């Protein structure tokens, strides 16, 4: 009988979800924009960052539904995964044009550039119009380690409560629902441990 392979342990593959502030953390582009296929390459120029994210970072959830197949005697002999609803929840810490457009929809945000005598202003409308489907990238950089989440087709389907108080920042909580891409994948996660292997 063959002994099981030994498990290698390495701290190089222990990742912490630190935002990549050089490239951008949560980024959005029109749906169909070419996507990166690794954890380190520069995103397409169409991807624009949404600014600061709150300290809770991002949460990826996969709500799965399984169907049991039972035999005549009532025993479960197989389980089939019938649905998989993947969402990413995050909270924009900035109320800027990009975060507002992502949360409320492009057509619901009007930006008036500043001039020598006026400040930059923004008008955000809340109505039944839904935010557009888009492509999303979430970039993380932990030392030399890279971690990237790619969503080819995602739409903000939930927007949490916005609180306006004198003791806390105004934030915009959102939930992005991911739809399958051409390969049937809703989300692709890429990692890079930053360690070059010596021949």
Image (spheres, grey):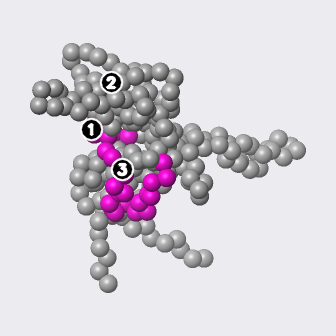
- Residue 172 rendering spot, x and y as whole percentages: 35, 28
Alpha carbons under labels 3 and 1: distance apart:
15 Å
Camera sees residue 39: yes
Helix, strand or loop for disc 1: loop
> Was residue 130 drawn as part of the magenta stretch in this picture?
no
Q: Residue at x 50, y 27 (%)?
A: 129
Please report whichever mark, 2 or 3, sits nearer to the chain's N-terminal start: 3
Q: Are marks 2 and 3 in contact (CB under 8 Å)?
A: no
Disc on res. 52: 1
- The quarter of the picture where the C terminus appears is bottom left
Report the span colored magenta: 31-58
Residue labelled with disc 2: 123
**Above or below, 21 relative to 175:** below
Camera sees residue 11: no
Q: Residue at x 45, y 54 (%)?
A: 33
Q: Are marks 3 and 1 in contact (CB under 8 Å)?
A: no
Please report whichever mark, 2 or 1, sits nearer to the chain's N-terminal start: 1
Helix, strand or loop for disc 2: strand
**Above or below, 196 relative to 123:** below
């Amino acid at each position: 009988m063959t002994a099981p392979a030994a498990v290698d342990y390495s701290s190089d593959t222990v990742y912490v979800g630190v935002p990549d502030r050089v490239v951008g953390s949560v980024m959005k582009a029109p749906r169909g924009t070419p996507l990166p296929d690794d954890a380190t390459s520069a995103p397409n120029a169409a991807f624009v960052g949404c600014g600061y994210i709150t300290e809770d970072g991002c949460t990826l959830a996969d709500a799965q539904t399984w169907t049991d197949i039972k035999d005549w005697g009532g025993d479960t002999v197989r389980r089939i995964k019938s649905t998989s609803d993947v969402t990413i929840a995050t909270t924009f810490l900035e109320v800027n044009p990009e975060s507002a457009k992502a949360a409320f929809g492009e057509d619901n945000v009007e930006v008036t550039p500043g001039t020598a005598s006026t400040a930059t202003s923004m008008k955000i409308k809340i109505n039944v119009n839904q935010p557009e489907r888009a492509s999303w990238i979430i970039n993380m950089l932990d030392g030399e380690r890279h971690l990237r989440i790619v969503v080819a087709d995602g739409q903000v389907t939930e927007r949490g409560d916005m609180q306006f108080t004198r003791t806390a920042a105004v934030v915009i909580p959102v939930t992005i629902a991911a739809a399958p891409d051409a390969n049937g994948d809703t989300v692709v996660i890429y990692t890079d441990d930053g360690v070059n292997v010596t021949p």
